[in-house]
Every structure is written in C-alpha cells, then in structure tokens.
Amino acid sequence: MIRAAASALGLAMDADALARILRFSATLATWNRRLRLTGEPDPVRVAEQHVADSLAVVGLLPAEGPVVDIGSGQGFPGIILGCMRPDLELVLIESRRRRANFLRDAIRQIPLPRADVREQRAESIGAPLAGSARVVVARAIRLDALLALAQPLLAPDGRVIAMQSERGRSEAPRIAAEARFRVCDERRYVLADGSARALVVFQQEV
C-alpha cells in the first residue's frame, strides 16, 4: 500500500526507505495505544491518510537541508520525509512535550541520525537555525500563520511548502501577497479515500 501510494505520486521507493517507514509506523502504533496521537487508530487508514499525504512532499525537497517541519506532531510530514531522504538535515519543531518525546523515540527507532527535535514554539527558534532553512514545511497550519512563522527561518532562496485542502489552496495567492510572498509552484493530488489535496509552494518577494 505504501509503495503503491509512492508510485501514484511518481516516487521510487527502495527497500530501505520502506523498512524505515514501517519501523516508524510500528513506533507510532505503540505510542497511539497509550496517547492516541492520531485521531485514526487503524494503521491502514493512517497509511492511506497521513503517510501517503506526507509522501507528496518528497518530490519538492531540496538537494540539501536544513528542512524544517513546523508543528511536526505525529511525525507527518517530517518523519516520512526523513525516511525517504535520510541524507537531509531535518529539524522537527514541536512544542508539546509528549509529542516531542514520541518524535525523539521514532528517530531513535528508525533511525534517522540527521534529524533533530526542537521542543519549543516556532516563533521562539533563534540561531543557528534562523535564516538557514532551505525548506519550511507544515501540515494543517493556517497559511497566514505559517508564512509568518517561516519567514525568519528561511534562507534567502528558501521555500515554504504548505500542505493544504482545496479551500486553502484557493486562498493562497491573496494570503501570500499580504505576507510579501508569492506562490511559485502548486501540486494537486488525491488520496486513496478521495480527498483532494494540494501542495502550495511560496517564496519571499525580493
């Protein structure tokens, strides 16, 4: 199923990447039984809804990091990106302690030696991360809030990838202009349950 989702997105997934994702899924299932990290307890539905959604970002990743996932929570998309691209420097920002602890455990179990968890709010992140991110990505954060949080973290040529519903996508150009960003790319796709999704990519206006 995970390989089929990757193939539908035009991604090649080798055995090592699949093994990393399966180890992550097992870790998430263990934590889910105690803390209910995801609203959906069924591992098959988690793969269809969350893993597949996260895989859509892989084709937009840069050659090198750092890549910053704001509000990483249950590890979507950040941990999945790390499973597919373990070479990338990856920073997962999560202010809630239990979820940050889960992310640390997942990184150990997979393992992802180039991934790091910052247990703090994104607006409080300072040096050395400020001004260095090649990509800032987030799922389920309002676009206006995401662009405001991402701006101080971005390298001069950095990009913001917003994972959005169709409704969020339609508002992107207006919100970008108000925040002194522009929409530079957009990818639309459909999940296995028929949900229409989009990746909206932003760059800062010079």
Image: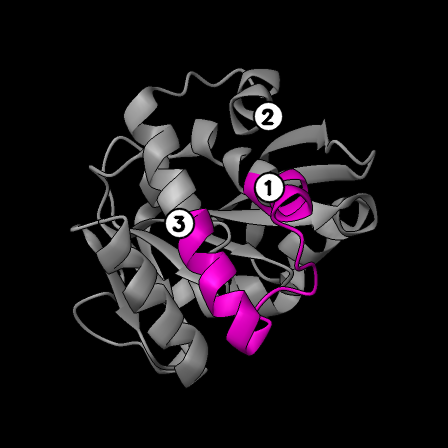
The 10 Å Cα crowd at callout 3, few under 14, some 14 to 19, many 20 or more, is many
As shown in the figure, which amino acid type bears the numbered disc 3? Answer: Phe
Q: Which residue is mark 1?
A: 47
Q: Are marks 1 and 2 in contact (CB under 8 Å)?
A: yes
**Real-space Cα separation, disc 2 to disc 3, in angstroms:** 17 Å
Residue 71 appears in the figure: no
Q: Quarter of the image holding residue 139?
A: bottom right
* Placement of 65 over or under 27, stated as above or below: above
Q: Quarter of the image holding residue 70?
A: bottom left
Q: Which mark is residue 24?
A: 3
Q: Which residue is mark 2?
A: 5
Q: Are marks 2 and 3 in contact (CB under 8 Å)?
A: no
The 10 Å Cα crowd at callout 1, few under 14, some 14 to 19, many 20 or more, is some
Magenta stretch, residue numbers: 24-51
For image coordinates 43% across by 51% down, the residue present is: 26
Q: Earlier in the sequence, mark 3 or mark 1?
A: 3
